[in-house]
Structure formats: structure tokens, C-alpha cells
Image: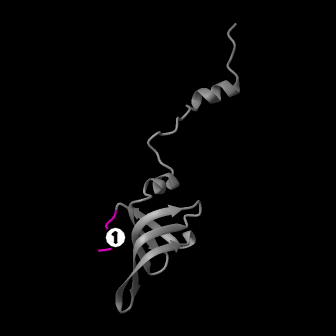
Amino acid sequence: VSAMPSDEARESQARPEHAPNPSALLPLELVEKCVGSKIWIIMKNEKEFFGTLRGFDDYVNIVLEDVTEYEYTPQGRRENKVQQILLNGNNVCMLCPGSAGPQ
């Protein structure tokens, strides 16, 4: 008499185990790799920033150095240079590492 596999055994055979993809990066790991590099940051409002990423935290609050701030107004684009800035992560829309910034 052969034994029937249990329901649990059948389910484990039907669902193959998926190993994590070793080349996949978590978002904060990608940002971590960009520290010390130039990065273009697009905010939720009409502002963009381009500068050197110096640091960030788990909330994606960001510290940039040698920054150019771009503000889009009805009169056109305004640029402002600042040495260092702290951006609130709640207002960050997109990070563009490796970009040359707005053209």
C-alpha cells in the first residue's frame, strides 16, 4: 500500500521556492551607492535640484552640496546656487542618479 502525500506536501511541491535575485537592489541601497556622486532631484513642487549627494536617511531627507536649484515660474526658469541644502523627503518626487540635470 502506497502512502498518499499530505495536503501540505502537495502544496509545497506545487509552489517552487523562489530565491531572491542577487542583482536586485532595494531603493535605499541604490541611493546609498550614489553618495558622493552628482544627482538630479525633482521635487513635488516647481523645483529641481542638481548637486553632489552627501547623505540621506530612512525618510529620504537628503543633504546636497554644490547645489544648483531650478525653479520654474511663469516668467521662466530661475537658477540659484547654494553651497549646501537639506531637502525634506516628503517633498521628493524623483531621484535621477547619473543624470546631467535639467537641460
Percent position (x, y) of residue 101? 34, 70
> Residue 97 lies in magenta, yes or no?
no
Compared across the picture, whether 70 is left or right of 9 comes to: left
Q: Give the residue displayed 55% in from the left and 64% down from the top.
A: 60
Give the number of callouts: 1
User: Foreground: 20 or 39?
Assistant: 39
Q: Outermost residue toward the top?
A: 1
Q: Which residues are magenta?
A: 99-103
* Numbered disc 1: secondary structure: loop
The amino acid marked with disc number 1 is Gly
Q: Give the residue displayed 44% in from the left and 79% down from the top.
A: 47
Q: Main secondary structure of the magenta part?
A: loop
Compared across the picture, whether 39 is left or right of 103 comes to: right
- The residue under label 1 is 101
Q: Give the residue displayed 57% in from the left and 71% down from the top.
A: 90
User: Would you identify the image quadrant in which residue 89 lies?
Assistant: bottom right
> Residue 101 lies in magenta, yes or no?
yes
Percent position (x, y) of residue 36? 41, 59
Compared across the picture, whether 100 is left or right of 36 comes to: left
Q: Residues within 10 Å of mark 1 (few under 14, many from 20)?
A: some
Coloration mode: one colour
User: Would you identify the image quadrant in which residue 42 lies?
Assistant: bottom left
